[in-house]
Image: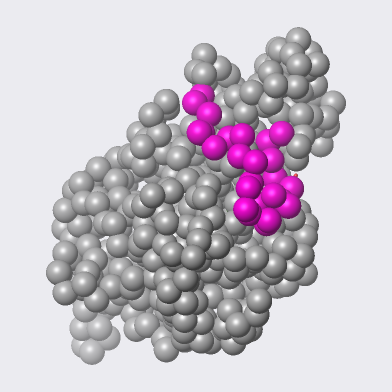
Amino acid sequence: MIGLLLLVTHTSQAQTRKNILVIFSDDHTRQAISAYGQKQITTPGIDRIAREGALFTNALVTNSICAPSRATFLTGKYSHQNGLYDNGPRRFFDGQQQQVQKGLSDAGYQTAWIGKWHLESLPQGFDYWQILPGQGHYYNPAFINMQNDTLTYPGYATDITTDFSTRWLDQRDTTKPFFLVIGQKATHREWLPDLPDLGVYDSIDFEMPANFYDRYEDRLAAADQDMTIDKTMRIGWDLKAPAPYASAAVYRRLNPTQKAAFKGYYDGITREYERIKDDSAALLRWKFQRYMKDYLSTARSLDRNVGRVLDYLDSTGLAENTVVIYTSDQGFYLGEHGWFDKRFMYEESLSTPFVMRYPGVIKPGTVVDEMIVNIDFNPTLREIAGAPIPGDVQGKSILPLIQKAKSAKTNWRKSMYYRYYEYPEPHRVAPHIGIRTNRYKLIRFAAPVVSWELYDLKKDPTEMKNIYKDPKQASRIAQLKKELKQLALDYGDTDGAAMVEME
Ligand code: SGN
Ligand code: CA
């Protein structure tokens, strides 16, 4: 009798508690999404989540690269607390520590991570996982399964990751609510579109950001980086001209039909390249256009698969009872400052897209401008699930913001702490710490380009004018330094706090 009662309670709980589905992409930036203002192409899948839920205009990351961002998502903690600092020598993730899926599992959820994972250690605490090894491949990708076997599957990574995810949903234990993360490889470098998407945007002349030809005056770190479309981007590897020789490793993965499509398309691109390659100004403009076309075509399949997931939830009757979040591990440069890649605390890579549909709780069309940080994701999901939030979590649930309580908004954080470590490879971005308020940003770069930068984001949203040396800013700088140091200390980063005192 008692057993039966327990079973009944459990089942009815499963029906009332919301499922949680997170689509977590890679390097997909807000400038590429129509809900965030991209005008030349549309992203109907992601836009639908925003339209039916909330668009967060101020979602930021603590350390703008892949593995650190994933570790922060899982733990709700800064890099110096979860132990994963970079994609390089300090990239090991200790899976024994507190993570969101463990909390949700304890609260009765069935949990899974499918797709790109990109942590050195295998997932722990999930009922099910199936992941890409490392960065993974776009075409005919391999996946590691829970038996630790690596198997190759024909097709395109974004589709296959979605297929595996809906298959898991079909087969899940329906007596429990679920927590599923769909980790998409797209739109990571080297931007290889699904073959039917090759050339879809070729007729569009993409608008260059106004600061594409940035000369980096008064910004030592920006001048010293190695991530420009002009000098760093490789014609062969990144832009596939000439095809297929420069991307031989990619080409080898393809079957004969795929090879014909790939080579057929990029041979045409190579002919374009041959025509302009001796005119350096035209070549740079061409590289920007090719970058945008390949990146956005890769994103097209990503967005289509977001739409597929939403359709799946509709057709299985799960939509009403499932919270859906779309986000990326960080933002990316689409030619701003002349760059691709991320890492810098400047706006394009500090921010990340974040849209959330929460039926019955978020009013459709909600826009949240408060500053949320990726340390908040772990506690937010825990609160949705009714799971306790452990003391070591450094973020806070964002639910009060969407519940529109005015007091929550007034008491919300007014500034955030950032710290980036990886140096010098692969893009020579100097380590830095910084503070971002709703209006100002103060950054301190470390050796070999020790320097401070201050931006007024209202007057200078594209961060072209470093006003750190402006005498009129002296008291503001003193105040921001104090706050930066305090934030570092509050988060337990004594090294970071010490950097504030250095010259
Ligand atoms: C690879 C890329 C880099 C990129 C890192 C990290 N080079 O090394 O451009 O910054 O990944 O990206 S590539 O030639 O191999 O494409 S991250 O998203 O995993 O942090
Ligand atoms: Ca990334």
Q: Position of residue 323 (x, y in %)?
A: 30, 58
Q: Position of residue 57 (x, y in %)?
A: 34, 52
Q: Quadrant of residue 144?
A: bottom right
Residue drawn at the location 68% of the way across and 56% of the way down: 220
Horizontal placement of 207 versus 118: left or right? left
Magenta region, main secondary structure: loop
Q: Quadrant of residue 97?
A: bottom right
Horizontal placement of 117 versus 171: left or right? right
Horizontal placement of 458 versus 342: left or right? left
Q: Is residue 276 above or below residue 404?
A: above
Q: Which residues are magenta?
A: 206-230
Depth check: give the residue in front, 225 or 176: 225
Residue drawn at the location 44% of the way across and 64% of the way down: 472
Q: Is residue 246 above or below residue 476?
A: above
Q: Quadrant of residue 496?
A: bottom right
Depth check: give the residue in front, 474 or 62: 474
Depth check: give the residue in front, 398 or 417: 417
- Please indicate, yes or no, whether residue 285 appears anywhere in the rendered image: yes
- Quadrant where the C terminus sits is bottom right
Q: Is residue 394 above or below residue 354?
A: below
- Please indicate, yes or no, whether residue 126 appears anywhere in the rendered image: no
The verdict on residue 219 being magenta is yes
For the image shown, how many numbered marks are present on the structure? 0
Q: Position of residue 16 (x, y in %)?
A: 20, 67
Residue drawn at the location 44% of the way across and 44% of the way down: 30
